[in-house]
Amino acid sequence: MRANRKALTFTPPLEASHAELSVQPGIKGHVSLLLKFAAFGVFFFPSNMIVKPLGAIGTIPLMVALLLLALWLCSVLFGLQNPLKTRHPGRLGVGLLWLGTCASYVALYSGFSGNTSVASQAAADRWLILVLASAGIVLVTAEAVRTLNDAMSLVRAILAGAFFCCLVAAIQFLFRVNPMLWIQEAMVGFTDNGGNTAFQVRGLMMRVAGSTFHSIELAVVCSMLLPLSIWRSLYDPIGRKWLHWTGTALLVFAIASTVSRSGVLGLFMGMLVFVPFLPRIARRWALVAAPMAMAALFLGIPGLVGTLTSSFTAGDSDPSLTTRTNNYPRVAEMFGELPFLGLGPGNYQPANALNILDNQYLNSLVTMGLVGFIGTLAYLTFPGISSLIAARASRIPALRALAGALAGGGIVAAGCSLTFDSMSFPVFALTYPFIVGLAGGTWIMIRRELDLRESTVVDDGDSGPPPGGPAANTSTPNAKAITWTP
């Protein structure tokens, strides 16, 4: 806790109705430039561009995330911080994923999995490094976000990258041009490692990917960040409101441009979780704005209704659905052979594209067994569920809405991981840890709010009414405000 930070003032729970007191203008968040650069860089730097000697791990976003982890470890080793003081459910999820990864990794290298080769070891190394990079983002973000102003500062950086990605998607969709090729040409010394799919035909429409690897990844990431964008648009005291809402509209447009069932599913899941935690007026506006936005998209993008309708009603005639269901018997067979530790982290690499597992949980079950599956399940579900619990407990409007937005984003990530192998996509894999870290910081802030609320109740009970005067009425609008520095 910083002694020189201006205090955040709010009223006791019964009087907490002033949203403007939650995020104060003129107070900058104390989030490092490196962390904000990492958040923006996930979207700006193409994940297919690598430093060739380093291989697939030599992307700029991944290297910056590993640098964050190294700095965090150094701060712990030199006693600059105590890692035991920052505890939250998301960190438990990361820890369980790390344990499952290490167990499967050791089994692979020891020959227990029966799949030890240079290629399998390289795949396991890549997965291990990805988990380390994700852990670095989670740990540093949770440490950095101590106040709502800190959270707002980091959210601005994340959304700046997301809005850039959406602008790229809009250009791709409208003009069939890929601006990411221009950035790739400017990255001297980097090599194109392939794997990205900027354009893909579905029905009568062209699906686009923005600066992500695939249109499904773009749809899920935008759905995950949409609640945060709405929260920022409502509470950010810096900048023009119309620009904030334009960015939010871009996220919705990007979801529509992917023509993705996963995007539609994520959009509805995220908003269903988030809207109840908005202020009353914002909830009413949401009921009006949502149908209008949907109508504008359907009228403004020819063929969108027909393509989405056909994709949802195709049934067994849709190859993207049949390949998923046809893989279930093979998954059961592979799991039966190595049920506890799997083939090895990142070692499901089918030669036939029809055998790709579009389900992160099944992928983890095959590659890391039951131990790794539990870790993956914890990593993808704990942040969303814990943020939902925290949002229900908070009485500060902006903090409650932030927790609700993170709950929506976390549940989108967990739900949509059933529809594609999310951790195999680099933008999702490095964006989701920011959600986990922000959820951890928000969890800690709400715990402090609850502690302060309890201490206030105790103080009021001990003090009693003044001699000869009436008992204090804590429900009046003029009740004394509490000063709290998160």
Image (spheres, helix red, strand yellow):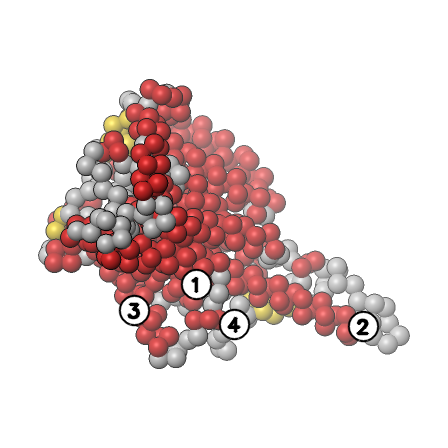
Q: Which residue is mark 4?
A: 6
Image spot of residue 442 (x, y percent)? 50, 59
Q: Determine whether the residue tagged by mark 3 lies in a helix, strand or loop.
A: helix
Distance between the alpha carbons at the discs numbered 2 and 3: 52 Å
From this view, report whether residue 284 is shown above or below residue 446.
above
Sooner in the amino-acid sequence: mark 4 or mark 3? 4
Q: Of discs 2 and 3, which sits in the foreground? A: 3
Quarter of the figure with residue 265 = top left
- Say what amino acid the circle numbered 2 marks: Gly
Residue lying farthest bottom? 78
Q: Residue drawn at (70%, 58%), measured in percent from left and top?
A: 14
Q: Which residue is mark 1?
A: 142
Whether residues under marks 2 and 3 lie with C-beta atoms below 8 angstroms apart, the answer is no
Q: Which residue is mark 2?
A: 464
Sooner in the amino-acid sequence: mark 1 or mark 2? 1
Image spot of residue 86 (x, y percent)? 47, 68
Answer few, some or many: residues within 10 Å of disc 3's Cα (few below 14, many 20 plus, some between 14 and 19): some
Sooner in the amino-acid sequence: mark 2 or mark 3? 3
Answer few, some or many: residues within 10 Å of disc 1's Cα (few below 14, many 20 plus, some between 14 and 19): many
Q: Determine whether the residue tagged by mark 2 lies in a helix, strand or loop.
A: loop
